[in-house]
Image (tube, helix red, strand yellow):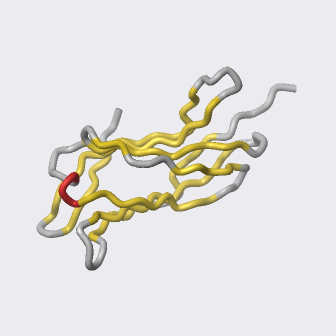
Amino acid sequence: MEATILTMEQNGPERCELSPNSNFVRIRVPLRAAGEGQKTEATFGFSIGSFTGGEIELALEPGFETSLGFRIPQELFRSGEQLSLEVFSEGAQGLRMVLWSKHYEVGWRGKAPSLEPITD
């Protein structure tokens, strides 16, 4: 019997806001694991411009819901920069399998940070 692979899907709108009393932009993206696969380890990572953020380990199983939360220094959150988000797992042969990814153009609406999805 062939194993079904888990995938991730966005489970609601992303949130983007300034952190109170700091110079960071906070971002939250709700995700849910879909499929009938077995419990697996995955990693979430992001990059903006030439900056790559730290990776967060996730233990995924069918129906697992999470809200990926991270923050970006405000000086890196420049209008026109591209923010890339990715959830991936490492296969048995070290092959990287992308379970979910999304790309945004970052910007500002007055003093509020904003994310505009980029369609591939």
The quarter holding residue 49 reads top left
50 or 80, which lies in front? Answer: 50
- Is 107 placed left or right of 31 in the picture? left
Q: Position of residue 22 (x, y in %)?
A: 26, 73
Is residue 19 shown above or below 49? below
Q: Residue furthest top?
A: 93
Task: Using the image as rendered, state which of residue 47 and residue 31 is in the foreground.
Answer: 47
Residue extending farthest bottom? 21
Residue at image position (36%, 60%) is 71
Q: Position of residue 62 (x, y in %)?
A: 72, 50
Would residue 38 be found to the left or right of residue 11 on screen?
Answer: right
Image location (x, y in percent) of residue 53: 38, 48
90 shown above or below 102: above
Q: Quadrant of the N terminus?
A: top right
Quadrant for the C terminus, please.
Answer: top left
Residue 36, above or below 1: below
Judging depth in this view, the residue of 99 and 43 nearest the camera is 43
Q: Residue at x 58, y 30 (%)?
A: 97
Residue located at (41% from left, 59% from top): 70
Q: Which of 85 and 8 is in front in this view?
A: 85
Snapshot quadrant of residue 39 = top right
Q: Which residue extends farthest left?
A: 110
Furthest residue to the right? 1
Position above or below: 22 against 61: below
Residue at (43, 62) in percent of width and height: 28
- The number of callouts visible is 0
